Amino acid sequence: MIPDELGWTLLIGMFLFAGVMLVVKYRARGAKEERLRVLGFETCDSEAPGLLATYTELAGGHLPGKEKSFQVARCFKRPAGAGFLYRFTATDLSVRHSRSIHDGAPVAPVSDVYLLDLGTRARAVLRPCSLFLSNLGGGMFHGLLAKLVATQSLGQKLELPAERATSFLAAFGAVQGKLEEHLSAPLVELASRAAEAGFFAAHFGHGKAVLETSQDMRDVDAQVNTLADWVSC
């Protein structure tokens, strides 16, 4: 049995640790957003409803009735090509709502999201699809992660090109087939490079692309530089 004094010490220590981690998280977020401003982004929270609708349409799944639920916040944009490059945070409410609060489930996952108009590159999107990326270079962990991603209910699983086996984990569309029947070579190549920059997912449709990265990825410059090729024609 743990003595009362030790129990209180452990409890206080846990709260202090959680507080420190929260401070670290908010400071990291603030540093990233300050870097976005230096790179020419400005806040655009008034556009959040439209960004949410577009993000949900592209990233919410490719089968009727399977659309996921999200929340977006902390919206930024800067001119890019003929339109804008948007950057915001997205919370996947579907995960939190689908699991019991009593089973120790984590809070809804949050990712940093970039949304852009593809311009003339939109011709390379043959059908809407979602592509999950990997920078692991293959190996056992890559294989385990690919199996986990493949269980998601985002549509029909697409066959990946053999030459991209180490860059991609899985792809989904509304109909069965191959990735190259949904996405042609120029965007497949750009998606492969995005994996190297730390993006973990790319969604395509209606002339637009959405790319997602973990909030732990702090190199905003690398992310923005990688996406420069997506809007240049």
Image (cartoon, rainbow, N blue to C red):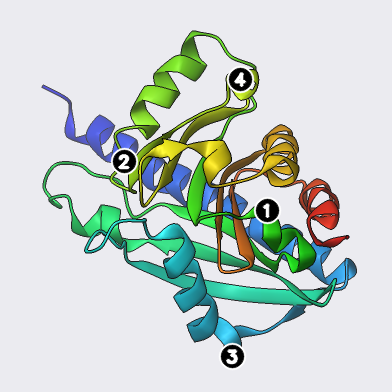
Tell me the CA gap for discs 3 and 1: 31 Å
Question: The disc labelled 4 sits on which kind of residue?
Answer: Thr
Q: Secondary structure at mark 2?
A: loop
Residue 152 is marked as: 2
In contact (CB < 8 Å): disc 4 and disc 2: no
Distance (Cα) linking label 2 and label 1? 25 Å
- Give the mark nearest the N terminus, 2 or 3: 3
Q: Residue 124 — which label? A: 1
Residue to which mark 4 is pinned: 166
Q: Residues within 10 Å of mark 4 (few under 14, many from 20)?
A: some
Residue for point 82% across, 46% down: 222
Q: What whole-number distance in Å separates the C-alpha atoms at marks 4 and 1? A: 22 Å
Q: Which residue is mark 3?
A: 46
Residues marked 4 and 3 touching at CB (< 8 Å): no
Q: Position of residue 75 (x, y in %)?
A: 62, 75
* Mark positioned earlier in the residue sequence (4 or 2): 2
Residue at 49%, 51% in the rendered image: 129
Q: Is residue 92 left or right of 184 when viewed as pictured? A: left
Check disc 1 and give the amino acid type: Ala
In the picture shown, does residue 139 fall above or below 230?
above
Q: Amino acid at mark 2?
A: Gln
Decide which of 11, 25 is in the foreground and name it.
25
The circle drawn on residue 34 is none
